[in-house]
Amino acid sequence: MLHQYRVTKYNPDFRDSSGAYKREDWTSHSDIGTFFSGEKLTEKCYLEVESAYLEAATSFLSEAEIYSLSVVGIENRRADLDAPREGSVIQLEHVKTVLCALLRENYWCKLESDHAFIHVGYEYYMYSSVPCVCTQAKQHTIRMGLFVESFPSPHLRDAL
């Protein structure tokens, strides 16, 4: 059984009954320098949140003993020369590099295996699925200031 999570910087207390987030907040690397709720998004602040996402993803994978994921559905509209190829196997120690590029919207793909996945969606949403509960990874993620909710990825393919 896969345990699926939505990992975000968005506090679920600020969602309406349909699940929409109702606070003004940044959603992209390109928002650096823009003001949200009277506060300017600095590169430092962005990098702190990005780092927490990268750490959260690898924490779930490590605790679940998932050591590699494959690239599925690569979309490289910007012709990023560092983008992986379809089917490439990404070892755990390189997952952060790919996720960083996904969070910065350099290209898009899903990272999947038979027993786990990491999907990055629009507006800085990340979805993780692992074959076990990963209590330590959840707690670590929350301590970093992110929110972990049971939630299926909207990017699931039928085979999972």
Image (cartoon, rainbow, N blue to C red):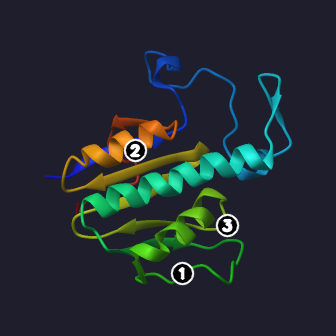
Q: Nearer the viewer, residue 19 or 126?
A: 126
Q: Does 66 appear above or below 80?
A: above
78 displayed left or right of 69: right
Residue at image mark 2:
140
Secondary structure type for disc 1: loop
Residue plotted at (51% across, 73% down)? 74
Q: Residue at x 47, y 49 (%)?
A: 126
Question: Mark 1 and mark 2: span between their CA atoms?
Answer: 29 Å
Return the mark for residue 106: 3
Q: Earlier in the sequence, mark 1 or mark 2?
A: 1
Q: CA distance from mark 2 to mark 3?
A: 27 Å
Q: Sequence order check: which comes first, mark 2 or mark 3?
A: 3
Q: Which residue is more in the foreground, 138 or 160?
A: 138
Q: Which mark is residue 84?
A: 1
Which type of secondary structure does the marked residue at label 3 adopt?
A: loop
Q: Answer above or below: position of 91 versus 12.
A: below
